[in-house]
Image: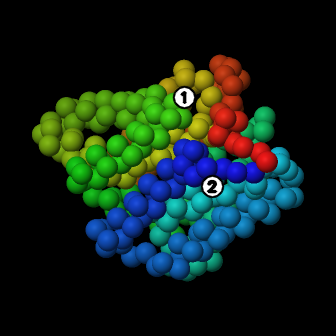
Amino acid sequence: MKITLFKDVRDYQILFLSLFLILGVLTRDWTLHPEFIGVAIASCIITQIIFSLITKSQNRILPINIRSPLITSLGLSLLLRVDHWPTMALAGFAAIASKFIFQYGEKHFFNPANFGIIAVLSFTNDAWVSPGQWGEEWWYALLFAGTGGMILQRVGRWDTTAAFLGAYSLLAALRNLWLGWTWDVYFHHLMSGSLVLFSLFMVTDPRSIPNARISRIIWAVCIALLTFILRNYFFLSTAVFWALFALAPLTILLDKSWFSPRFSWWNKAELKIN
């Protein structure tokens, strides 16, 4: 088996998320312990290997999937903060285990990193997420949009990002008008690096979101609406993560309502089997 580097779009995703992690540490002065990144990576990969061997879900011709748990671990490292390494290990285990446990029609419907984050927020006392850690500097948003756009163009999921950001932006604009705020407040809020990062790299995971385009648009608009409600009426700073978690099972109903082939990362033209 020979897999050429960067033939798989996930290689670009791993590269970009790694660069974001380094950029965040260098420019945002995050309280991130390097050893916790190692714990996240190790726990995700080990869990992936164990569950793959137990369920025998992997094609024996292909190697056990390492890219997916690596992407998940980088996502956890970017967004999740913990005081103790067992909590990060639990997040990694819960994230990957959710792919194997919560399936319908051989498709998992929870975003792994999001599930891991919600798990430790719910069951531990030393985990937190800081959605404002990227600030509202415009160049972060441009960087995320450029790199995320490259990936979304390849996997064909621009519609999901556009639906989520479009719906959320419209709701925020209406609220801004209702409250009589100036438009600089509005744009300041939408330029949040964390919001752009979420809309490009988390809500667009092609393996867990609805398959059909109309389903993805409906799903993304629902997430935007619930995020808006949780953030502005319940004052929940982590609203986007709870909204994605709460509405993840809606994927099952939408896939049954509008059929479309399930997304697959594997492209036979890019694999050479010796």
Q: Is residue 213 left or right of residue 231?
A: right
Residue at image position (69%, 42%) is 271
69 and 255: which is toward the camera:
69
> Which residue appears farthest toward the front when viewing the image?
274
Contact, CB < 8 Å: mark 1 with mark 2? no
94 and 158: which is toward the camera:
158
132 and 140: which is toward the camera:
140
Marks 1/2: CA–CA distance: 24 Å
Q: Percent position (x, y) of residue 79?
A: 46, 61
104 and 139: which is toward the camera:
139
Q: Percent position (x, y) of residue 20?
A: 39, 60
Could one spot residue 225 in this view of the protein? no
Q: In this view, does 90 lie to the left or right of 71?
A: right
Check the image and tell me how it is coloured: rainbow
Residue at image position (78%, 34%) is 105
For residue 41, which quarter of the picture? Answer: bottom right
Q: Percent position (x, y) of residue 77?
A: 50, 66
Disc number for residue 216: 1
The residue carrying mark 2 is 67
Q: Is residue 20 left or right of residue 271?
A: left
> Where is 265 relative to 3, above or below?
above
Residue at image position (47%, 41%) is 151
Q: Earlier in the sequence, mark 1 or mark 2?
A: 2
Could one spot residue 202 in this view of the protein? yes
Disc number for residue 126: none
Three-letter residue code for mark 1: Arg
Q: What element carries label 1?
A: helix
Crowding around mark 1 (Cα neighbors within 10 Å: few <14, some 14 to 19, many 20+) is many
Crowding around mark 2 (Cα neighbors within 10 Å: few <14, some 14 to 19, many 20+) is some
Q: Percent position (x, y) of residue 35?
A: 53, 80
For residue 238, which quarter of the picture? Answer: bottom left
Residue at image position (65%, 71%) is 42
